[in-house]
Image: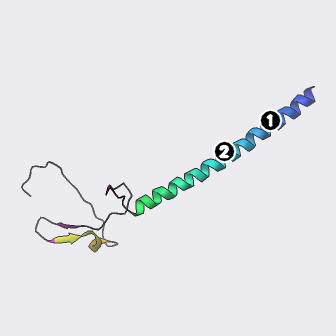
Amino acid sequence: MDKFLSIISIFLAHAVVAYGIAETAKDLQMTTGMEEQQRQTLISPTAGGRLIVGMVAPNFRLKDGYGKKHRLSDYCGKKNVVLAFYPKDFTGG
């Protein structure tokens, strides 16, 4: 009887491990698909125009405090760009 229970418990342990491996593989496939979708989202902005942290910024043009126009693409690969926006700053600029 003890030998039979040992064999059954070993069989059940193997079944649990095999099930866990199958579920892990399924989870990895789902995660990989999600990561691909996130990667595509980071490459191109959504139709709504919302940006996400890590997304490649769209090219734009702004004037500095002296009236000189700057494009983001002018600095691509040359310098770090930090944009700071102060909503409701109440300045005349």
Q: Using the rendered view, name the quadrant where residue 61 is placed.
A: bottom left
Give the structural element (helix, strand or loop) at label 1.
Answer: helix
Residue at 33%, 63% (x, y): give it.
57
Range drawn in magenta: 46-68
Q: Position of residue 37 (x, y in %)?
A: 48, 57
Q: Is 61 in the magenta?
A: yes
Main secondary structure type of the part rendered in magenta: loop
**Chain-order first, disc 2 or disc 1:** 1
User: Which residue has dot 1 on it?
Assistant: 12
**Which quadrant would the N terminus be assigned to in this image?**
top right
Q: Position of residue 21 (x, y in %)?
A: 70, 46
Q: Is 59 in the magenta?
A: yes
Question: 1 or 37: which is nearer to us?
Answer: 37
How many numbered marks, from 0 up? 2
Residue at 21%, 54% (x, y): give it.
85
Q: Using the rendered view, name the quadrant where residue 78 is placed.
A: bottom left
User: Which residue has dot 2 on it?
Assistant: 23
Looking at the image, residue 65 sits to the left or right of residue 16; the answer is left
Classify 17 as above or below 87. above
